[in-house]
Amino acid sequence: MPILNNILESLHPKEKQILTMIGRGLASLSDIVRETSLNTDTVMWALNLLKDKGLVRIVKDQEIKYVLGIEGQKYLRIGFPEVRLIRKLKEHVPIEELNLWYDELTYGIPWAIRHKWIKIYTKHGKKFITLTDNGKSYLNKTYEFEEILKKISSGLPLINSDIMLIKELKNRGDIIREKIFTTISRIELTSLGHEVLKELKLEEEITSLTSDIIVSGKWKYVKFKPYDIDSPTEPLIPGRRHPYREIIDEIREILLSFGFEEVSSPPIELNFWNCDALFMPSDHPARSIHDIFYIKGFHLNMIQNQDLLKRVKETHENGWITGSIGWGNWDQSLALKLILRSQTTAVSVRYLSILSQGDLPRKMFIIDRNYRPDRIDAMHLPEFNQCEGVVIAEHVNLRHLMGYMKTIAEAFNIKDIRFQPAFFPFTEPSVVGYIKHPTLGWIEALPGGIFRPEVTLPLGIKVPVLAWGLGIDRLAMVALNIDDIRLLFSSDLEWLRTTPIPSLKR
C-alpha cells in the first residue's frame, strides 16, 4: 500500500486525466487527444510518464513506406536510361554514332540487354547495336519500373508484385528509398495501472498559489500538489565561451593595456614575407614541403615594392650594406610562391615594411593561426596559434625582450620559466623560453630575439626590433591544466561545460 500511495502522490494531473480515459476504454492516441482536448505532445509526455511508472503498456506497430530517391525523381521525369536508349535506336547503328547520355551508356545498355531489347555485334571492326523484336514491342508499352515510380509518387497502394520490383530497383542506386514509420496501435492498462485507477480520486490539484485563489477563499478547499524538494532535476547549463577563447581575449586585453596595437593578416601568404624578407636562405630545411604548406599552381610574378625586392635579393646574395656576406644565392621563383603562413613573424615583417622613422617607437602584436605539416600528437597540430609581437625603439635590448615574454607567461599564472640561447635565421641574439607543465615537464613556448640587420635594414628600419612568436597554445595548456593540445579545440561538451577558466593576472 505505501508503494501505491507513493505512485498516487507522484501523478501529475494530466497523468491522472489520461489514466482515467484509458480506464474508460480509450485505447488509441487519437481518441485520447480528442477526448482530453490536449495536444499530441502533451498526451505523449504523460503516456511516457505512466509507462515509466509501470501503469500503462504502449503497443507500437511499424509501417514501411517508400519514397523516390534523387535518381528515381529524375527517371520519373525523363524516363529510365534503358527506355531512352531504345527510343534512340534504328536498325544496325554503330554504337559510336549514337549520341548517348552517360547513364544510357553505362546503365541503359546492360539493362536493355538483360531485358533482351537489344543485340550488340561486331562487323568490320565496329560494334553495332540493334533492336530486337522484344525491344520494338516495348516502344509502345509502359515500362513496369516507370509504373512503380508513378505509384509511389502518387501514394497509390502497392501489391506483392510491386514489392518484388521495388527490391530490384533498390539495388540499382538511389531510385527508391525505404522509410520505416512507427505508430502506436493501442494503449492498455497494466495490472498495477488497474490498481492505481481504483484508488484514484480525481481532485482538483494546484501547483501554484495565486492571488485569485487566496482572495476567493478557494485555497481552503483545493488540494495542493506535494512538492518533492529531493526530486532530481536537470542541471542548469548556461551558455559560455570556449575556455581557450576566453584566455586569448584576456591576453589581447593585457597587450592592449601595455600600449600594443593589434594587426591582422590573411593566412594565405607570399613565401617572400614568410621566409625571404626574414633572411631565411632559399635552401633552408624549414622551407621544404615537410615544413610549409605550398598552394599548388599559384604564385605571383612580382610584388609591389620593387625596391624592397631588390634589397632583399642583394642581401641574400652578397649582404648588401648590412655588413654580412649573405648566403651567396637567392631563388626568386621560390620567394614568389603562395603558401599557408607557417609563422606570424611574416606579419611582423609586413608591418615593419610600411613604417618610417617618424612612426617610431611602435609596439605591435597579433594572435592568429599558422599552418605546418606537423604530425599530430599531444604537443603538435597542423594548425596552431602564435602570439606574435614586436617592439621597435631605441635602446631596447635582450633583457627587455625576456621581460616582455616573462610578463606574458606570468599572465597565464606560469611561475616556472627558463631561458636559454637559441638560433633563428632572422634574429641575433636569440633565446627560447621553457615553461614547466605539471605532467609533461619542461616544454618550449617562448621563442624570440632581436631582428638581424639583414632583416631590418632592407625594410628601412635602423633601430633595434624585439620580436617574439609565443606558443600561446602551449601556454594555455598549462593555464587550463591539460596535457593534450587537441583539447584546446575540442567539441567535448562535458569538458567545455566543466573546465574552470583561470583568471589571468594583469
Image (cartoon, helix red, strand yellow):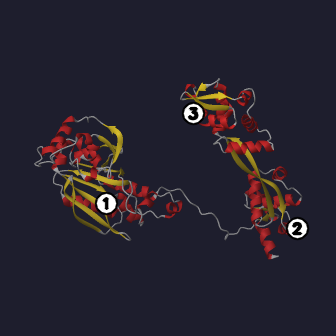
Is 199 left or right of 108, judged from the image as shown?
right
Q: Residue at x 80, y 41 (%)?
A: 157
Residue 465 visible in the current orientation? yes
Is 340 left or right of 468, judged from the image as shown?
right
Q: Quadrant of the C terminus?
A: bottom left
Give the number of the disc on residue 454.
Answer: none
Q: How many marks?
A: 3
Mark 1 or 2, nearer chain start: 2
Residue 62 screen position, x and y as percent: 76, 53
Mark 3 or 1, nearer chain start: 3
| Extreme residue toward the right, this view | 24
Residue 320 screen position, x and y as percent: 12, 43
Q: Are marks 3 and 2 in contact (CB under 8 Å)?
A: no
Mark 3 or 2, nearer chain start: 3
Residue 284 screen position, x and y as percent: 23, 51
- Give the CA separation, mark 3 to mark 2: 71 Å
63 vs 1: above or below: above
As rendered, which of 447 and 210 lies closer to the eye? 447
As rendered, which of 454 and 265 lies closer to the eye? 454
**Disc 1: which residue:** 408
Crowd around label 3: few <14 · some 14–19 · many ≥20 (10 Å) = few
225 vs 395: above or below: below
Is 145 left or right of 24, judged from the image as shown?
left
**Disc 2: which residue:** 198
Does dot 3 land on a helix, a strand or a loop? helix
Residue 81 screen position, x and y as percent: 64, 33
As rendered, which of 37 and 288 lies closer to the eye? 288
**Disc 3: which residue:** 102
The picture quadrant where one finds residue 412 is bottom left
Kind of residue indicated by mark 1: Ile
- Give the CA separation, mark 3 to mark 1: 63 Å
